[in-house]
Image (spheres, coloured by chain):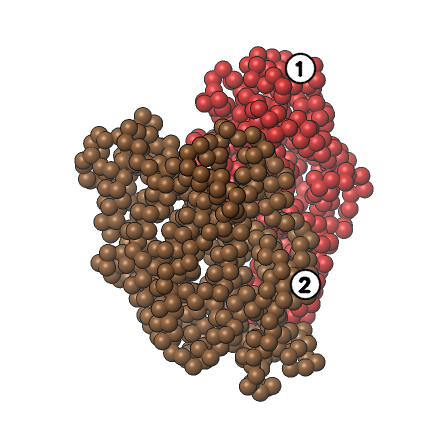
Amino acid sequence: MISDQLKNQHLLWRAGFGPAADQQKQILKESPKKLFKSILESSRKDPVLFDMADPALKSLVMTASGSAFPQKRNLSPEEKKNIRTQSVLDIKALNIRWLQEMTESDAQLREKMSLFWHGHFASKTVNIFYDQALLNIIRQHALGNFRDLLYSVSKSASMIQFLNNNQNKKDHPNENFARELMELFTMGRGNYSEVDVKESARAFTGWGASLQGEFEFRKRQHDDGVKTFLGKTGNLSGEDVLDILLNNKQTAVFITRKIYRFFVNDQADESKVAELAERFYKSGYDIQKLMASIFSSDGFYNEENIGTHIKSPVEWLVGIRRQLPQEIENPDVQVLLQRLLGQVLFNPPNVAGWPGGKHWIDSSSLMLRLRVPQLIYSSDAILLKPKDDDDLMMGMKDVQQAVAKLRSGEIIRTRIHWDIFLDHFKDKPDAELFAAIQQLLLQSPTALSEPGMKKYMDLSGRNAMIQSAAIRFMSTPEYQLC
Amino acid sequence: MGTLATSSFLVPKFLKAFETAGKLGAGNKVLVVLQLSGGNDGLNTVIPVRNDIYYRERPALGIDKSKTLTLSEEAGLHPELTCFKSLYDEGNLAILNNVGYPNPDRSHFRSMDIWQSASKSNEYKSSGWLGRWLDSQCEHCEKPTQALEIDDMLSLALSGEQMKGIALRDPARLYNASQDPFFKQILQSGNAHSANDTNSYLYQVMAETLSGADYIFAQSKLHPTNMVYPNTEIGRSLKTISSLICSDINTRVYYLSLGSFDTHVNQEGRQQKLFSDMNEAIKVFTSDLKSNHRFHEVMLITFSEFGRRVSQNASGGTDHGTANNMFLISGGLKKAGSLNGMPDLANLSEGDLQYNLDFKNVYATVLNKWLEADDSKILGGKYEYLDFV
């Protein structure tokens, strides 16, 4: 028999970033159904869009014609370097800002869904304006319609640059975008031929973005000849190709399966996926409806789906911040952790996004995860050095240094608001404390024993015991799961 | 060793495996992969000393023939690579030129991804070639110490579908970090719960790490090298590797990186410094192996995610290019010296060298002939072997 508390925590971890410290009452008293309703309600609101670009950089870029940033040839190498460094710094600020939103926002499902799309539509630029615009598109459409999302992402400057649609011209088609569109964004491998890739690349010729990030259709570079794509023949445009892909049911199946694996279980239940995909397709790609079907189904709360998902580094980091409310004095340290653990926002490994699951865990990343709660608790240093990121550094060591203190020896300086955490347990008798802390923090069944754990806890007082128990539970393999 | 569990019936299967891991018997070959991160400039590494195009395209950066270390009439080595020159003369160094892959990618990360995962440029693999080698070695055993990376983070190259190598900066530090009694406590009490597959996976990784740390540390103390290595990062790393190679550890693959070779600006000084560090460390490493009679069983190979453009840029550097050279160093080479021709600078593709040897052929050769593994399974296809081993 699975308790409502466990179900509610499961829902909060999967449809968001875990239970927040002030949600204790909801977790204990509400039904999962009602809780999901309130999550969905708050996630429906329009997001506050992020604007983390440095004002000086912005005025440089946005000053109509003759603007400095776009007209790179007018700039001295020193100016170019400064712009680049500022842009990379701003992307880091955007990263930290988004983490804050994931931690504090009530719109948990929207932000979680956005993280999913951020990995699905993986793109990487060193342009703050492009990165920010793409994230804002994703956050606006995260729970909207997949058709709108696909259109907007395909026409975003970030994607156009990352997958070389800017270089896709009538005389020299560039197939990069067309190929990934089918392989990764819509149908998945095995549902199209190389000819389909070539023909659709022709349809996207002329798609470009201005240096300010606006979509541009360059008619003269567009190939307006006859193309045949997935059995349809005509003078197909890029939009026609997107429509053909959306009209193909395989797109609904592919997206639904990926969503199911991200939100429910890494091992997809194919009959459930087929059923959900059918409804998703019939709804005209209504993402919110799909998510409501997933989270309201009984199967979602089956034992095999609870506590079996390995938290991604971002889920793990944000989850800790939600459970242990804290002010981080040096927020950059979160970027160092992302790097050491293998998931830096705005920096996916490639266009396929983060593979997830067991790929998050190796000896180094696991041992670091197990030590971080203790490092937070005692303000100790992280004595690890991440690998260089040559794409960011561009051969300039000082850019890297400006970008983040990505050095070994960085200390996690936080102030944990223990009073809020302690408040959870104020009515618990001493004898039930250990179990209550475990139930709040661990989603997976565990064989950890109370006497064994207590040897490593501070039993000098009630508050000390609760605090040290929380840190110890967060330092277990079980805490990596939700 | 073996302090993890107090009574043997508590020792799970994957811990027991360590006790029977067995030594690496004589005749077992060892591979050391040195990654030159950032895109090393191959043309200023093995220099085409008789090529006018080279000197024309690099009026400032081109290295004068008289300064290079002569390999042949056509080729000279970068002046810092004196030890490589000696190894070349002894027949213990092979050079492969024009190594690359079709449709080269000029992003560091993506191209490194392609090299480390051994994928095609339009294919995304989430495991590395040496990780898949580990998978193939260890289908039924648990010996993650078969592949070690000298670093704080594990590279994709050593990450398999099932098995993953272990990353460590140095054995003592890994050991100290693993000695936290709390970790031993949770490992002892927590791992009995195996109903949850991901949970037991995490416990397995944890157990392998802790016992691996014990094992590696104990081995590193068996035959610590008495050679003096340079006090650089690569010097310390190769010293660790040498001590482990000379112990009884079961490790067959070591991985380390040197960088950054991303020389867009002021290339000359940067490459010189990195080469000097590399040269000095490898000089001690190879003579260490020779004096321990292991040089014929160890092969060190170098690679970089791409080479650089033929023309110098306006900042005293070079930008991202394509095909590049690889060094193969061992006392057990069947064929040494320059194994294929110098790059054809008259026949470029948009200012870049054209590859004529796929790096996957080199991997296939190393996997099959050196590590005696099923290369086509690991690489997902058949690649012709080269004849250097």
Q: Residue at x 34, y 44 (%)?
A: A154
Q: Residue at x 68, y 63 (%)?
A: A379
Q: Name the residue carrying label 2.
A: A379
Locate residue A301, reporting x and y percent: 38, 72
Q: Secondary structure at mark 2?
A: loop
Chain A drawn colour: brown
Q: Nearer the viewer, residue A341 or B229?
A: A341
Q: Secondary structure at mark 1?
A: helix
Locate residue B172, reporting x and y percent: 73, 54
Name the amino acid type tagged 1: Lys
Badge 2 crowding class, 10 Å Cα cut-off, few under 14, some 14 to 19, many 20 or more, is some
Give the CA distance from mark 1 to mark 2: 56 Å
Q: Chain of mark 1?
A: B
Name the amino acid type tagged 2: Ser
Q: Is residue B359 above or below residue A374?
A: above
Chain B drawn colour: red
Locate residue A219, reporting x and y percent: 27, 31
Place residue B225 in its image quadrant. top right
Q: Is residue A234 above or below residue A190?
A: above
Question: Which quarter of the image is occupied by the N terminus of chain A?
Answer: bottom left
Q: Nearer the viewer, residue B175 or B298?
A: B175
Q: Is residue A167 above or below residue A433?
A: above
Q: Name the residue carrying label 1.
A: B65
